[in-house]
Image (cartoon, helix red, strand yellow):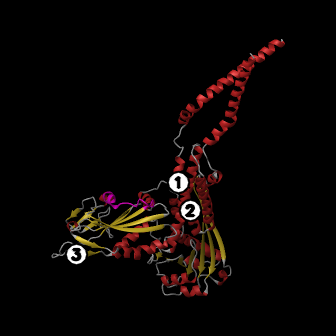
Amino acid sequence: MATAEVERRRGQLAALSIAAVVIIVGVPLWWKTTETYRAWLPVSQIRELAKLQLQLSADVEVVFARGTVTPEQQKKVPLTQTQEEHHAVDEDTALKYRYETKYRTATIMEEDALNKPTAAEADLSLHVLSESPCGSLVIYVIPESSSLLPEDVKVYIGQRRTALLRVVPQMRTAKMLEQLLHHLQPHIKQVLRVMSFSRADITAALSDRVRFHPGNKESIADSMRAFKSSPGYEITFSLLNPDPKSHRLHWDIEGAAQTYIQPLLTKMSPVANFSIDSQTLHYAMLGVNPRFDNTRNAYMLNADSLAHVINPVEARLGSNAASSNPVLNFLLYVPDAYHSPLYIQDQNKQEVPSNAFHSPRWGGIMVFNVDSYYGPEAEFPVDININMAKVMGVFLAQLRLLLGVQSSPPPPGFLVAPCGRTGLADWELDRLMWSRSVENIATATTTITSLAQLLDQIGNIVINDNIAEQVSSAVTSLQLAVAELEAGNLKFALQFSKEAILASEKAFFDPSLLHLLYFPDDQKFAIYIPLFLPMCVPILLSLIKIASEARQKRREKQAKKD
């Protein structure tokens, strides 16, 4: 009996020891080794960014030339005024436009520059005197009698960040400076709508964050024409030769791109990185049969058939698999001898002057007719040198549209200077940088907010340290971009917004986020039950037996006492 009692006691201690080891050591160790690792994220800061409050600040300098203000008015100059305009886009997005306008009189050197024979020369001289910072504007108010502007022109917008504003009759009758500024203010606002950020541009830049309902087809087309903001773009020029037996085509695409396209891309380097390549495709057809017009003795492509031109050609263009940047395609199509000349018609059945068209967020196609080279004694194939100046003029205009450079017609009385060899004025670049900064901030905040919501809803997604670093980097860059926009530092705001969108997208599309995304609880039970059930059942039965024997002993002791 004593030996049996000792063995029973030893069995109980063994069962209790195993249960204690399992509960105290095994369960915590299993819990720790199988838990989903989730690094810390700045959730509170992300929630603050979800309520996007942007302030766009621009510095405007208004300079009065000699003869535009009276001596009494000149005593109150220099003067600074600040104007703010609030714009509630929706319940989570609000914008504030802030203009700090400084009024002063022109210096002696600026007066000499304003006495130049032409407005273009005056614009260049004023630029040499002092270069305005990125995002700022200088408006020179000149007398009504000035010969810089034609009689029917009241505002001249130069290639830089300078505008010339002619004194209007109401300003001449103003005796006090306040009255003068009151009459001048509407004209300054009109200049700002052309040269600086406008509500329409900034609102369109928020399309990824806010859903809009344009009122007409034209506004829908305008909002969808330009490519979305991207860190880089691939530009591909393709020469399509449908019949090499008719002609041998020669095009100096390298020299033409360097002369006409590269200056624009160099100037737009703060916005994005660009790469250019070219190719020649033989036996490449348009995919639609042009219609022969007897009255014009030419083949015609009407506007309705243009939508069917791109798909057959696009299949042969190829793509750069090593890059994820958007591709801008520019195609030069030279029709064969049997379908020449070939002209493009618009909706009104009129020939398009450029003989080209562009497709939103895709590229452009130009038809280059060479029927004049086919003489009665021509020997096929005919050697043809393509006029690259004519071709690149069309492609440059299409490239500006596809990259988001606004080219809306100026208001009545405005004269806009040509862009020059760079193809882009300084103030046009500023407008694009304003839009891109806001678009990048809106896209990055939407991406990072969506990621935070996803990780909060699905608790078994692994959050590695590199993802947390990318999220923190995106949040920090967003905060800096918003602060720089508020301070009016456009160049830094764009740079930080680009860093924010890169970091946010890198975190959002990280493959490690999908590691446990599709690992439901029923699969966990299917894995763990065969492992733990055979071990837990004997331990559990032993504990039940020990508890039963303990209760039995207590009852026996209680009976003896009674």
Are discs 1 and 2 less than 8 Å apart at CB? no
Q: Secondary structure at mark 3?
A: helix
Q: Is residue 213 above or below residue 352?
A: above
Q: Earlier in the sequence, mark 3 or mark 1?
A: 1
Left or right of 506, for residue 343: left
Q: Mark 3 or mark 2: which is in front?
A: 2
Q: Amino acid at mark 1?
A: Val
Residue 247 screen position, x and y as percent: 23, 71
Q: Residues within 10 Å of mark 3 (few under 14, many from 20)?
A: few
Q: Amino acid at mark 2?
A: Glu
The Cα–Cα distance between marks 3 and 2, rounded to whole angstroms, is 52 Å
Are discs 3 and 1 less than 8 Å apart at CB? no
Q: Is residue 15 above or below residue 66?
A: above
Q: Amino acid at mark 3?
A: Tyr
Task: State the residue position of label 3.
Answer: 373
Mark number for residue 499?
Answer: 2
Residue 558 screen position, x and y as percent: 81, 15
Residue 205 screen position, x and y as percent: 51, 60
The Cα–Cα distance between marks 3 and 1, rounded to whole angstroms, is 54 Å
Q: Is residue 479 above or below residue 431?
A: above
Q: Residue furthest left?
A: 377
* Along the viewing direction, whichever of 292 and 460 lies nearer the viewer: 460
Residue bounds of the magenta highlight: 311-326
